Image (spheres, rainbow, N blue to C red):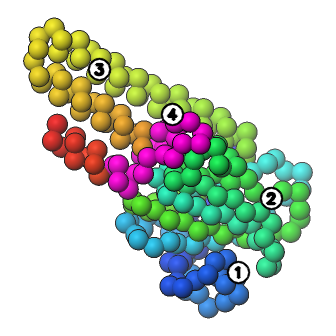
């Protein structure tokens, strides 16, 4: 089961000098805004944003996950809060090695507390080095695993087709020595690299402890190379 949460959460640009979640909870006058009924996009921002949403997982229900469907977000801090007590705290984001995450997916994914009747709040602190896009959704764990497998199969087929095209044109280059074929190979490979960084697949190709590529610096450089090619 999949539940989009667009329009059900609030967001806040981090006030200057905010010292973390405790200070955020201690003050009730922050200017929270309600998210629109479509994936929230804030463009290029140089400051952190906070999201909050009230949730409740029924006792005996399947395990649920919260997904922030943006693989290029640099850092995400997750808090599940009831009152002033923190029930869970997790970290994710593109700058965090895959092996350091509780949930080893390319997008930020967090396990929600379960087995309690009482509702709770989820707070997310989000930072980005590129365009800040915040599609938020809740997933049953089994459904999310199936979704990831289908998405990986689709993307694998797309990337595989691009690599076949690159290999074919590389063979043509060696046969004809026409540099236009080589330029096309470079163009296609840069397109594959762009997809890998933008979709977070570079995380899956690197060792679990490796520091991933930084989309905020890598993507503009790749676009420049593609334009030149």
Q: In terms of secondary structure, where does tag 1 sit?
A: helix
- Against 54, is 195 above or below? above
Is 99 placed left or right of 89 in the picture? Answer: left
Is 10 placed left or right of 167 in the picture? Answer: right
Mark 2 vs mark 1, foreground winner is 1
Residue 114 horizontal/vertical position (percent): 84, 56
Q: Is residue 125 magenta?
A: no
> Residue at horizontal 51%, vertical 61%?
134
Which residue corresponds to mark 2?
A: 113
Q: In terms of secondary structure, where does tag 2 sit?
A: loop
Q: Are marks 1 and 3 in contact (CB under 8 Å)?
A: no
Q: Earlier in the sequence, mark 1 or mark 3?
A: 1
Mark 2: few, some, or many residues within 10 Å (few <14, many ≥20)?
A: some
Which residue corresponds to mark 3?
A: 165
Q: Earlier in the sequence, mark 3 or mark 2?
A: 2
Q: Earlier in the sequence, mark 2 or mark 4?
A: 2
Q: Work out how far the residue at label 1 is from the one at label 3, CA to CA, in angstroms.
A: 54 Å
Identify the disc placed on residue 63.
none
Q: Earlier in the sequence, mark 2 or mark 1?
A: 1
Q: Work out how far the residue at label 3 is from the one at label 2, CA to CA, in angstroms.
A: 46 Å
Q: Are marks 3 and 2 in contact (CB under 8 Å)?
A: no
Q: Work out how far the residue at label 2 is from the one at label 4, CA to CA, in angstroms.
A: 30 Å
Q: What quarter of the picture does the N terminus occupy?
A: top right
Residue 125 horizontal/vertical position (percent): 59, 68
Q: Nearer the viewer, residue 77 or 81?
A: 77
Residue 189 shows in this picture: yes
Q: Are marks 3 and 4 in contact (CB under 8 Å)?
A: no
Magenta stretch? 198-219
Which residue corresponds to mark 1?
A: 22
Q: Work out how far the residue at label 3 is from the one at label 4, CA to CA, in angstroms.
A: 21 Å
């Amino acid at each position: 089961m999949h539940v989009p949460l667009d329009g059900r959460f609030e967001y806040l640009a981090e006030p200057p000098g905010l010292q973390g979640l405790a200070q955020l909870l201690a003050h009730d006058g922050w200017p929270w805004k309600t998210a629109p009924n479509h994936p929230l996009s804030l463009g290029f921002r140089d400051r952190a944003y906070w999201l909050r949403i009230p949730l409740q997982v029924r006792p005996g229900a399947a395990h649920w996950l919260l997904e922030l469907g943006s693989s290029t977000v640099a850092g995400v801090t997750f808090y599940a809060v009831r009152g002033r007590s923190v029930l869970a705290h997790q970290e994710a984001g593109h700058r965090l090695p895959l092996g350091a995450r509780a949930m080893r997916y390319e997008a930020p994914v967090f396990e929600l507390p379960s087995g309690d009747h009482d509702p709770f709040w989820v707070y997310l602190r989000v930072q980005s080095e590129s365009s800040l896009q915040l599609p938020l959704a809740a997933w049953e764990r089994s459904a999310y695993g199936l979704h990831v497998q289908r998405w990986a199969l689709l993307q694998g087929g797309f990337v595989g087709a691009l690599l076949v095209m690159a290999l074919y044109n590389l063979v043509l280059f060696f046969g004809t020595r026409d540099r236009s074929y080589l330029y096309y190979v470079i163009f296609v490979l840069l397109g594959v690299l762009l997809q890998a960084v933008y979709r977070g697949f570079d995380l899956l190709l690197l060792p679990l402890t490796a520091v991933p590529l930084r989309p905020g610096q890598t993507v503009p450089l790749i676009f420049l190379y593609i334009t030149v090619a």
